[in-house]
Image (spheres, rainbow, N blue to C red):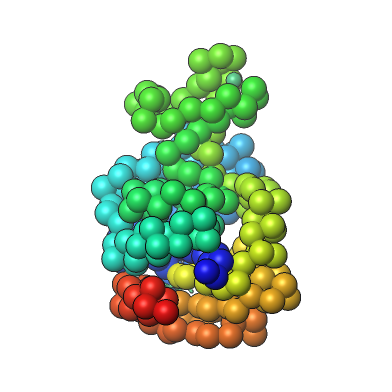
Amino acid sequence: MKKYLILTGAGISAESGIKTFRDSGGLWENHDVQQVASPQGFQEDPKLVWQFYKDRFNQSLAAEPNTAHYALKKLEDHLQDHFHLITQNVDGLHSRAGNERVIEMHGSLSNAFCSSCRASYRLADLDLSCDIPSCEKCGNSLRPDIVWFGEIPYSLYEIEQLLKECDVFMVIGTSGSVYPAAGFVMTAKLFGAHTVAVNLDRPDNLGFIDELHQGKCTQMLPALVDKILSK
Ligand code: APR
Ligand code: ZN
């Protein structure tokens, strides 16, 4: 059985009603991306940044996984250990669709951690009525557990191993413009994987894609998964 490795981005959640980043001209839900997605932005205005992520958290809870998320659940059910999913998304929709082998490389809207002692918290357990939630252990400010610009994504070592081992690497709903994730397709291809993209627009790293399925995730992915399962 072939080993499949999937990388998803904002495009897969677009049809669940969650806005992508670059499609709205550098604005993310009407905010300057740097202001709400960088350590400097958080330092300058933690209240605004927290409000932004509380809103995103509530938005993600109100959203539902779509047929593209469920297609990946179906693929994992079939492939089991031969399936791994890396997501740049922080909305939790892959887990809510039932996928288990998920690496959230850019963190999660559901979590926060202490900037000082690094204790971690679930947003569901915090009192979100205060402007800036604080750490029960040391009293310092908590921050959203989101990998911001200039920070190092999670699980890079594990991801590198998976990129080297996979037979098929699929990138779904991602512009291919934010590194290091945008470079994964190159690594996978150099190590011999067949590379597939499912995306509305042509991704920036198209040069490393063997097979492009251009269109909406919900229209392309269920059929593509059925084709893989029928092999
Ligand atoms: N189906 C398929 N693709 C879609 C759909 C859809 N319904 N809607 C949008 N897309 C595609 C767009 O064509 C675009 O290429 O999804 C891509 C989304 O690109 P970005 O907005 O750049 O999102 P992403 O690639 O996930 O961004 C990467 O950047 O801001 C950071 O950390 C943040 O994880 C994020 C990272
Ligand atoms: Zn603390």
Residue shown at 64%/59% (left/top)? 162
Asked whether the viewer can see residue 205, the reply is no
User: 50 and 188: which one is in front?
Assistant: 188
Residue at figure coordinates x 57%, y 51% from the top left: 105
Q: Taking 72 as reference, is 8 left or right?
A: right
For residue 194, which quarter of the picture? Answer: bottom right
Residue 161 in which image quadrant = bottom right
Pick whichever, 62 or 97, lies toward us. Answer: 97
Q: Is residue 76 above or below residue 102?
A: below
Looking at the figure, which quarter contains the C terminus?
bottom left
Residue 61: image location, x then y, percent: 30, 44
Residue 34 location (% of width, % of height): 58, 54
Question: For residue 17, what is the image quadrant?
Answer: bottom left
Residue 183: give x, y in percent of width and height: 67, 68
Figure check: 98 above or below 217: above
Residue found at the far front of this picture: 1
Residue ID at (51%, 78%): 197
